[in-house]
Image (spheres, rainbow, N blue to C red):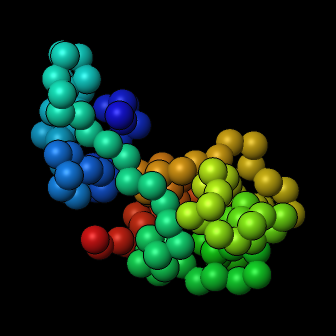
């Protein structure tokens, strides 16, 4: 379940097995759904290598390049198994000047928000 305060207009989420892009009404609906005992909740979309490629990010030996100084670090490439189906380590983080950000992320809406915070631009992504 996603908290409404995690979402921005344009974020991608799942709702009743459908993928949709958030608008102002979606965020209000998410807040309302979380406040009542509703079986229908907005769910995050887990990041996969395929999603990162659809976002237009280029892969190198450490992960995916966001910009000249920021990369998405893939824990399965460095010191990992390299096998997403067999691993529970699906948390990504950001590399900046050879330092790893302390907070990781697992979901597309988190990546979209982080990308905007780092670059000042929206992450172009279509499902």
Residue visible at 46% across and 75% down in the picture: 50
Residue 88: give x, y in percent of width and height: 63, 51
The quarter of the rendered structure image containing the C terminus is bottom left
Is 2 drawn above or below residue 113 in the view shown?
above
All told, the count of numbered labels is 0
Residue 20, by quadrant, is bottom left
The quarter of the rendered structure image containing the N terminus is top left
Is 98 drawn above or below residue 104 in the view shown?
below
82 on left or right of 32: right
Residue visible at 74% across and 49% down in the picture: 101
Residue 35: give x, y in percent of width and height: 23, 17
72 on left or right of 18: right
93 on left or right of 56: right
Is 51 drawn above or below residue 1 in the view shown?
below
Residue 71 visible in the shown view:
no
Residue 100 visible in the shown view:
yes
Residue closest to the far front: 86
User: 101 or 47, which lies in front?
Assistant: 47
Residue visible at 49% across and 60% down in the picture: 47
Residue 62: give x, y in percent of width and height: 76, 74
Residue 109: give x, y in percent of width and height: 41, 51
108 on left or right of 102: left
């Amino acid at each position: 379940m996603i908290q409404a305060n995690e979402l921005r207009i344009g974020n991608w989420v799942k709702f009743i097995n459908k993928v949709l892009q958030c608008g102002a009404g979606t965020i209000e609906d998410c807040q309302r759904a979380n406040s009542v005992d509703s079986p229908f909740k907005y769910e995050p979309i887990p990041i996969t290598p395929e999603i990162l490629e659809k976002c237009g990010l280029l892969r190198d030996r450490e992960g995916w390049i966001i910009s000249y100084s920021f990369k998405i670090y893939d824990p399965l490439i460095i010191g990992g198994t390299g096998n997403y189906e067999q691993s529970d380590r699906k948390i990504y983080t950001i590399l900046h000047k050879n330092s790893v950000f302390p907070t990781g992320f697992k979901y597309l809406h988190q990546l979209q928000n982080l990308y905007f915070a780092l670059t000042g631009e929206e992450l172009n992504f279509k499902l």
